């Protein structure tokens, strides 16, 4: 299911409505877990909130404890997405290209607070046996709080049972190893900007 489908906007009674597409939860203050519906009665994302693994909000963040996970593209500010991806240190394409990319993806996730989107992720899939994950980006001031982990768990759940590939920013490989990813020995890429990607450390 691509994110171009019409959104379902009801956000109450999380476990009772399997057709919901996003929900609101609190950043962790104690050990707890929730089932979060992603779009069908058989399509669930288990959100784990572990107190010891997530930093407590700074004083300036306490009014923004409410976080929303959104699984469609309806109403997304694509300039904001561009800024989030850029600030996270990833390649930030123009807003119109980002819109096309996310709307053409098999699964998407946006993490929002009162100020707007603070993190993103998406996955492409052939619907059979091959998938790839892109644009897992969290604003620097929100990193280290388990948001990236929640994004990855959501995407992996949506494309489970397939071969899944991604390419990590240099130095970030350890994050993905926590989810079972291993380095490819024969992986190759043909980038549009070969020299730039080589300079950044992505290729030989």
Image: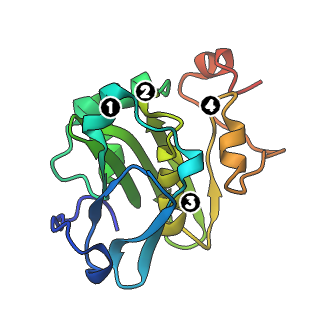
Residue 61, numbered label = 1
Please give left or right for residue 85 compared with residue 77 in the image.
Answer: right
Nearer to us of marks 2 and 3 is: 2
Residue designated by label 2:
141
Q: Quadrant of the C terminus?
A: top right
Q: Residues within 10 Å of mark 3 (few under 14, many from 20)?
A: many
Earlier in the chain: of badge 2 and badge 3, it is: 3
Disc 2 from disc 1: Cα separation: 10 Å
Q: Residues within 10 Å of mark 2 (few under 14, many from 20)?
A: few
Q: Residue at x 27, y 38 (%)?
A: 64
CB within 8 Å, label 2 to label 1: yes
Q: Residue at x 64, y 18 (%)?
A: 200
Residue designated by label 3:
131
Query: Secondary structure under badge 3?
Result: strand
25 and 126: which is toward the camera: 25
CB within 8 Å, label 4 to label 2: no
Up-down relation of residue 46 to residue 204 (above or below):
below
Disc 4 from disc 2: Cα separation: 18 Å
């Amino acid at each position: 299911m691509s994110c171009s489908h019409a959104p379902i906007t009801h956000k109450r009674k999380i476990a009772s409505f399997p057709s919901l597409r996003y929900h609101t939860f609190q950043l962790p203050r104690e050990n707890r877990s929730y089932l979060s519906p992603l779009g069908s009665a058989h399509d669930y994302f288990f959100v784990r909130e572990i107190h010891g693994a997530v930093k407590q909000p700074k004083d300036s963040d306490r009014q923004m404890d409410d976080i929303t996970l959104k699984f469609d593209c309806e109403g997304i500010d694509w300039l904001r997405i561009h800024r989030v991806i850029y600030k996270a240190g990833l390649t930030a394409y123009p807003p119109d290209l980002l819109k096309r990319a996310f709307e053409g993806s098999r699964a998407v996730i946006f993490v929002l607070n009162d100020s707007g989107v603070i993190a993103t992720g998406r996955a492409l899939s052939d619907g059979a046996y091959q998938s790839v994950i892109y644009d897992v980006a969290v604003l620097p001031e929100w990193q280290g709080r388990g948001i990236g982990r929640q994004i990855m768990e959501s995407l992996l759940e949506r494309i489970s049972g397939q071969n899944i590939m991604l390419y990590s920013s240099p130095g970030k490989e350890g994050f993905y190893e926590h989810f079972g990813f291993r380095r490819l020995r024969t992986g190759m890429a043909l980038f549009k900007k070969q020299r730039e990607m080589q300079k950044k450390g992505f290729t030989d």
